[in-house]
Image (tube, rainbow, N blue to C red):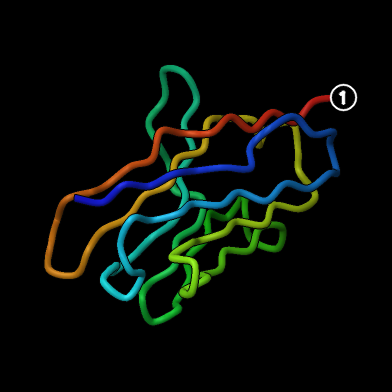
Amino acid sequence: QVQLVESGGGLVQPGGSLKLSCAASVNLFSIYVMGWYRQAPGKQRELVAVITGGGSTNYADSAKGRFTISRDNAKNMVNLQMNSLKVEDTDVYYCNARLYGQVTNYWGQGTQVTVSS
């Protein structure tokens, strides 16, 4: 079982920045892939950015050039730095993790990101 605790969401003006953090209850070296997804009401959850245990990253087209995902192995934490935020980035953002050798997806409780003037 993996617990994921998110922090860092909030309200920001267009063009501003936010940093989302996700703390895992297990050592990151046991995690195959970890990252962030977003979901709007009535819509499917979609990928924002993920990072593998080997450090490879994958970003949604909408996030490329603006968002950066990184791992802090010492703190068992994954961070998402979001810059140049747009109104359309508004959503609930969820942290996700999968362990090596398992197919179970673990999710955090979600954190609201609102971009508005």
Asked whether 61 or 79 is in front, the reply is 79
In the rendered structure, the answer to whether residue 14 lies left or right of residue 71 reads right
Asked whether 78 or 89 is in front, the reply is 78
Spot the residue most to the top.
42
Up-down relation of residue 18 to residue 25 (above or below): above
| Snapshot quadrant of residue 88 | top right
Up-down relation of residue 93 to residue 40 (above or below): below
The image shows a total of numbered marks equal to 1
Up-down relation of residue 44 to residue 34 (above or below): above
Residue name at image x 23 percent, y 48 percent: 105
* SS for callout 1: loop
Spot the residue most to the bottom.
54
How busy is the neighbourhood of tag 1: few (under 14 within 10 Å), some, or many (20 plus)? Answer: few
Residue 47 horizontal/vertical position (percent): 44, 48
In the rendered structure, the answer to whether residue 32 lies left or right of residue 82 reads left
Up-down relation of residue 10 to residue 22 (above or below): above
Residue 49 horizontal/vertical position (percent): 50, 57
| Snapshot quadrant of residue 61 | bottom right
Task: Report the quarter where the C terminus lies.
Answer: top right
Residue 30 horizontal/vertical position (percent): 26, 71
Residue 91 horizontal/vertical position (percent): 57, 30
In the rendered structure, the answer to whether residue 96 lies left or right of residue 36 reads left
Residue name at image x 37 percent, y 30 percent: 44
Q: Amino acid at mark 1?
A: Ser
Residue name at image x 16 percent, y 50 percent: 104
| Snapshot quadrant of residue 24 | bottom left
Disc 1 target residue = 117
